């Protein structure tokens, strides 16, 4: 497709999404801005995917979370973390909506932060030695992470988590679930996250999830990963 036509379509799509999202932008949860431009992760993650992923998918999670909570002002002061940690205490009729959309909002917010333009960060020596301590080598760590990403059946996420005692481990969750939810006993804080939903890669990689997962390493913001892990 002609580049000008493609850019015009993207701009138009963006305007429509912005108009729609403004129209529905009520409630306390907001779509965070990306810390870089939509084309910043090219060629590993294309700008069209980033635009649709952020203004389409993530915005929809935010809108649907706000909608679920609309009739429940007692939860309007709760952060998304608190909502997910105490999912079981919420009224039963909104638990699924908060699980899916609150999870989607939390997961994507972290995902945008732990990525950045290729070549803009390097792994700190402290983070590198922690990964080697728990996985044997950086290559071994990447292999295990990729295996979890490719092995997740259907849609979900892969995490690198750090326990309070410093242990690093890899886990995967289905759909928009994450370690905050009471259905899981995943100890620790996520310091790296990868979205393996098809909407994250299908335009560029089609059914080749493995290609997307390998490309992801080029756009990891290792400075942010180190910061989240306290390295
Ligand atoms: Fe996503």
Image (tube, rainbow, N blue to C red):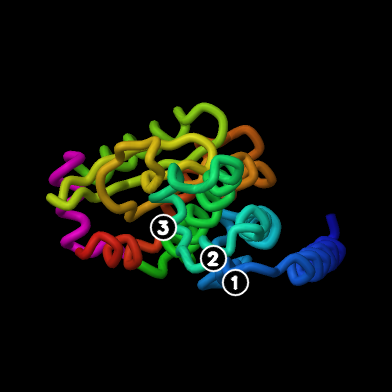
For residue 82, which numbered disc appears in the image? Answer: 3
- Label 1 near ligand 1 (CB < 8 Å): no
Q: Secondary structure at mark 2?
A: loop
Q: Local crowd at mark 2 within 10 Å, few (<14), some, or many (≥20)?
A: some
Q: CA distance from mark 1 to mark 2?
A: 31 Å
Whether residues under marks 1 and 2 lie with C-beta atoms below 8 angstroms apart, the answer is no
Q: Nearer the viewer, mark 1 or mark 3?
A: 3
At 32% across and 55% down in the image, what residue appears?
191
Q: Secondary structure at mark 3?
A: helix
Q: Position of residue 109 (x, y in %)?
A: 50, 61
At 38% across and 40% down in the image, what residue appears?
182
Q: Position of residue 219 (x, y in %)?
A: 46, 58
The boundaries of the magenta stretch are 122-136
Chain-order first, disc 1 or disc 3: 1
Q: Position of residue 65 (x, y in %)?
A: 61, 55
With respect to residue 27, does 197 lie above or below? above
Chain-order first, disc 1 or disc 2: 1
Residue bearing the label numbered 1: 37
Q: Is residue 131 left or right of residue 28?
A: left
Q: CA distance from mark 2 to mark 3?
A: 11 Å
Q: Is residue 59 left or right of residue 216?
A: right
Q: Quadrant of the N terminus?
A: bottom right
- 152, 63: nearer the viewer: 63
Q: Position of residue 95 (x, y in %)?
A: 54, 43
Q: Quadrant of the C terminus?
A: bottom left
- 34, 101: nearer the viewer: 101
Whether residues under marks 1 and 3 lie with C-beta atoms below 8 angstroms apart, the answer is no
Residue bearing the label numbered 2: 76
Q: Does 131 appear in magenta? A: yes
Residue 172 in view (yes/no): yes
Q: CA distance from mark 1 to mark 3?
A: 30 Å
């Amino acid at each position: 497709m002609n580049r000008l036509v493609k850019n015009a379509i993207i701009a138009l799509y963006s305007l429509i999404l912005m108009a729609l999202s403004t129209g529905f932008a009520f409630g306390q949860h907001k779509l965070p801005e990306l810390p870089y431009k939509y084309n910043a992760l090219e060629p590993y993650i294309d700008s069209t995917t980033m635009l649709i992923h952020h203004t389409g998918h993530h915005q929809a999670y935010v809108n649907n979370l706000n909608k679920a909570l609309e009739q429940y002002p007692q939860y309007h002061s709760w952060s998304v973390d608190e909502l997910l940690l105490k999912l079981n205490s919420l009224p039963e009729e909104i638990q699924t909506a908060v699980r899916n959309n609150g999870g989607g909002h939390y997961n994507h917010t972290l995902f945008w932060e732990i990525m950045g333009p290729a070549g803009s960060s390097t792994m700190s020596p402290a983070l590198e030695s922690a990964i080697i301590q728990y996985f044997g080598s950086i290559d071994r760590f990447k292999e295990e992470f990729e295996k979890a990403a490719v092995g997740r059946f259907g849609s979900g996420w892969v995490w690198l988590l750090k326990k309070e005692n410093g242990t690093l481990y890899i886990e995967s969750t289905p759909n928009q679930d994450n370690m905050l939810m009471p259905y899981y006993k995943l100890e620790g804080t996520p310091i790296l996250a990868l979205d393996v939903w098809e909407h994250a890669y299908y335009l560029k990689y089609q059914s080749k999830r493995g290609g997307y997962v390998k490309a992801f390493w080029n756009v990891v913001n290792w400075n942010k990963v180190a910061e989240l892990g306290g390295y």
